[in-house]
């Protein structure tokens, strides 16, 4: 699996509509708060034209795309960190995800109630942010209290960790996110152990009106979200959840025609997934043979043995070498055999760092 993402936001901002568009799972989407109680979970195939091209060239028995798990987490409200609106359960679901997709309503519609009574994107973001920070503060203060007692022993490691925790508490007491906290590599394990909510990378998803597509960049609420996100080095994607849910029901040819009519090259969801990959520093490599053409997700910088381990742990343990062809070389050559004959297939060892788009055959012995 590629990664898992949690969709968060206030009630009635379009979270479940977006989830349905991503997964075609049919989650209930209604015009009242807390329509989603237990989190809906769906698997999403990652669109990749390279995988389609390799499939057309190889004609395998099956094609397996990379997938991501998407969790539709119920709408948070003020006081969620204190348990209001089932907040305790909702916040615990966020702790499990790799990436937060924060859906923000950027459109007016008298027929769709807003839990705060009006549309104000940055205010809505801050409501969610404040609840996440408060929950993180609670966890940090507990850790600080425990370390303060333990530090009386004079243990240098405990004293050093306590100093990091104190600095972290002071940093987020002003509303900052843990992900923006300057930390040395030697202290990363401390933050990882705490598993704090605001340490998660965030992608803001501005949900706009269908009549604003494709010119939603001029939406004033969207501009405010961009300004806010830029301060914290976060990314912003524009979608119309209603249109995306309609696109999701179309076949490939119909989808292309619909996007062309809207003046769009790609759907908002395709852009969202690509941005999520970039935000998490992920790349894709491929395996291609007569039985299967498959996309695999790895972190940029992964070496060949660890990439092989994504397929099976035995591949990593008994790694000998990888026979690698760059995607463009594969396509230009026309086949694996032609690429090999043209000298485009490389034999790479244990120190080889995988590139995005590599088409690989791993050699191993266990």
Image: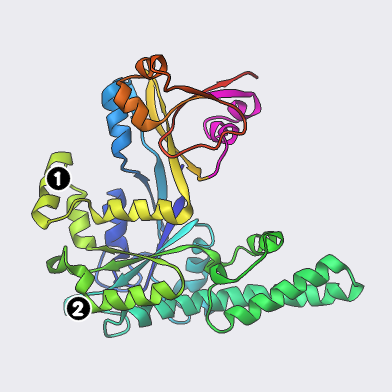
167 or 13, which lies in front?
Answer: 167
* Quadrant of the rendered image containing residue 33: bottom left
**Magenta-highlighted residues:** 301-322
Q: Mark 1 packing: few (<14 Cα in 10 Å), some, or many (20+)?
A: some
Give me the disc on residue 359: none
In the rendered image, the residue lying farthest to the front is 343
- The earlier-in-sequence mark between 1 and 2 is 2
Whether 186 is among the magenta residues is no
- For the residues carrying marks 1 and 2, which lies nearer the camera in this image? 1
Whether residue 366 appears in this view of the structure is yes
Q: Quadrant of the C terminus?
A: top right
Location of residue 194 in the rendering, given as x and y in whole percent from the top left corner:
65, 64
Residue drawn at (41%, 17%), measured in percent from left and top? 340
* Tag 2 secondary structure: loop
Q: Mark 2 packing: few (<14 Cα in 10 Å), some, or many (20+)?
A: some
198 or 227, which lies in front?
Answer: 227
Residue under pointer 1 = 256
Lateral position of residue 200 relative to residue 146, left or right: left
* Tag 1 secondary structure: helix
Lateral position of residue 170 relative to residue 274, left or right: right
83 or 336, which lies in front?
Answer: 336
Give me the disc on residue 108: 2
Whether residue 70 appears in this view of the structure is no
Lateral position of residue 265 relative to residue 321, left or right: left
Location of residue 143 in the rendering, given as x and y in whole percent from the top left corner:
71, 72
């Amino acid at each position: 699996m590629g990664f898992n993402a949690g969709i968060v936001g206030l009630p009635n901002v379009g979270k479940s509509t977006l989830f349905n568009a991503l997964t075609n799972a049919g989650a209930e989407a209604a015009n009242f708060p807390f329509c989603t109680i237990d989190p809906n979970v769906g698997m999403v195939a990652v669109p990749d034209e390279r995988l389609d091209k390799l499939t057309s060239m190889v004609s395998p028995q099956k094609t397996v795309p990379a997938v991501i798990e998407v969790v539709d987490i119920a709408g948070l409200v003020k006081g969620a960190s204190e348990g209001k609106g089932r907040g305790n359960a909702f916040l615990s679901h966020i702790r499990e995800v790799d990436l937060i997709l924060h859906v923000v309503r950027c459109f007016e519609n008298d027929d769709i109630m807003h839990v705060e009574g009006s549309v104000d994107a940055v205010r809505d973001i801050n409501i969610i942010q404040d609840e996440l920070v408060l929950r993180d503060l609670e966890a940090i203060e507990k850790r600080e209290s425990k370390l303060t007692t333990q530090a009386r022993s004079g243990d240098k490691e405990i004293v050093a960790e306590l100093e990091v925790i104190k600095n972290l508490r002071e940093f987020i007491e002003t509303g900052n996110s843990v992900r923006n906290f300057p930390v040395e590599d030697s202290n990363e394990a401390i933050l990882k152990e705490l598993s704090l909510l605001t340490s998660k990378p965030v992608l803001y998803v501005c949900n706009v009106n269908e009549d604003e597509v494709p010119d939603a960049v001029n939406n004033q609420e969207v501009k405010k979200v961009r300004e806010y996100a830029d301060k914290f080095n976060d990314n912003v994607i524009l979608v119309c959840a209603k249109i995306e849910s309609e696109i999701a029901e179309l076949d490939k040819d119909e989808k292309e025609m619909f996007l062309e009519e809207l003046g769009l090259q790609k759907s908002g969801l395709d852009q969202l997934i690509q941005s999520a990959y970039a935000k998490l520093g992920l790349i894709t490599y491929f395996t291609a043979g007569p039985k299967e053409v498959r996309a695999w997700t790895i972190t940029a910088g992964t070496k060949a043995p660890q990439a092989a381990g994504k397929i099976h742990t035995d591949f990593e343990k008994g790694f000998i070498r990888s026979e690698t062809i760059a995607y463009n070389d594969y396509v230009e050559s026309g086949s694996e055999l032609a690429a090999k004959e043209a000298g485009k297939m490389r034999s790479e060892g244990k120190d080889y760092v995988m590139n995005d788009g590599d088409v690989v055959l791993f050699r191993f012995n266990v």
